[in-house]
Amino acid sequence: MAPQMMVQMGRDMNFDFSDDQKFLKDQANKFLTEKCDTTVPRAVLEGDAPFDKDLWKAIVEMGWTGITIPEEFGGLGLGHLELCVIAEEMGRALAPVPFSSTIYLAAEALLLAGSEEQKKKYLPKIVSGELIGTFAIAEGAKVPTPHSLETRLSDGKISGTKIPVPDGDVADFAVVAAVTDSSGEDSSVVLSIVDLTGKGVSRKTVSTIDPSRSHATITFDNAKAEPMGEMDAGWSLTRAIFDRAAVLFAFEQVGGADRCLEMSKDYALTRYAFGRKIGSFQAIKHKLADMYVKNQLARSNAYYGAWALSTDAHELPIAAAGARISATQAFDYASKEMIQTHGGIGFTWEMDCHMFLRRAQLLGLCVGGARGWKDRLISALERRNAA
């Protein structure tokens, strides 16, 4: 029987995960607790390696790269609910690996828009860890739109510059959003697969607030491209891919926010000031309570998004935007309040607090910032109410 998240029980709706999914979450938590304590992302943060190759190899061996990929392409053929519980644990551990760019973005793009030949070519190698993928759309500080993109596709060749591209310095291929000479909003954007190791591609690592998740500038100069999906639906496909990714990133953010709350609570129960545990002071209690409320709101929205994603419900654009907004707010707030709860030592490099703040800020910008998702939520609600 296929796993389900929502069950009709009289007037009550159960949005909880199944026992099998909870077991998977527990196993992922144990695995990452053992393999990825904070010394792992710190080593990447302080070193020269773009990601932890040993952890990435172990994750591939666990089969997580094939969770949503059908068995015919070498995957496990499970579903997005299982991927959501894995994403939450990856967020708790601050895992410094190219999982999100490869699985949430590149693999989802292939599953949604790739041809049968493209799926056979790329998906099995994603499952085996042979290929790392990414999605390239941003072109600097401006918001990507069909009218602002400057990267162009012409006669099967692509030219332009994308910055920043998540894991662009280590990815083997990228799904690139570019404009064509066609007219109209949808028809002006096309998605293409580009081999980043081929001719006409140059890339350079760029600095971000969280060096444990590498980014790059990628310049295309008449690089060979494989168009994917319908040529007149590039922008619609991009929005659909981002809706899916937004839910998965929301679970990462919820995992990170919950870990911030746990660390803050543990510190408040062991740190003494004026002869008392600081957790007994009202100011600290309020901080922890506010973190808890925001985290629970984010989790509720993420669960709604997970249901919409797993059932391909028409509410997905609304659910994804809600999950994205509340999870971004929760992780941002929790990471900052954790530093405040730790006091002066919380600002130091030796403490792990800044690593969560870095990841919160970075995840808050991937697939677009909160302001853009608020606009999308309003637009989606207006369309629904007008229908």
Image (spheres, helix red, strand yellow):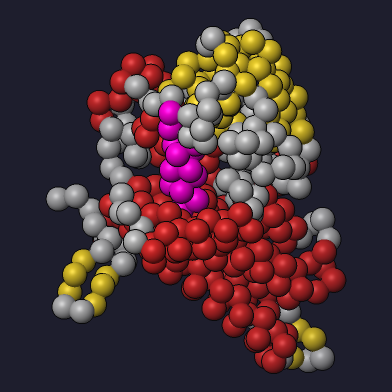
What's the residue at 50%, 58% (across, down)?
A: 379
The image position of residue 58, as x and y in percent, is 48, 35
Q: Classify residue 49 as left or right of residue 66.
A: right
What's the residue at 70%, 25% (across, down)?
A: 161
Q: Classify residue 108 as left or right of residue 192.
A: left
Magenta span includes 244 = yes
Q: For the magenta stretch, what is the residue range?
A: 232-247
The image position of residue 264, as x and y in percent, is 65, 73
Residue 336 higher or lower than 89, as above or below: below
What's the residue at 58%, 26% (across, down)?
A: 178
What's the residue at 56%, 22% (across, down)?
A: 180
The image position of residue 23, as x and y in percent, is 32, 56
Q: Quadrant of the C terminus?
A: bottom left
- In the image, farthest residue toward the front: 183
- Depth order, front residue of 103/153: 153
- Depth order, front residue of 267/325: 325
Residue 22 higher or lower than 130, as above or below: below
Is residue 155 visible to us here? Answer: yes
Residue 261 higher or lower than 233, as above or below: below
The image position of residue 319, as x and y in percent, is 42, 60
Is residue 253 visible to us here? Answer: no
Residue 302 higher or lower than 279, as above or below: above
- Depth order, front residue of 92/158: 158
Q: How many marks?
A: 0
Magenta span includes 153 = no
Which image quadrant for residue 208? top right
Q: Is most of the magenta stretch helix, strand or loop?
A: helix
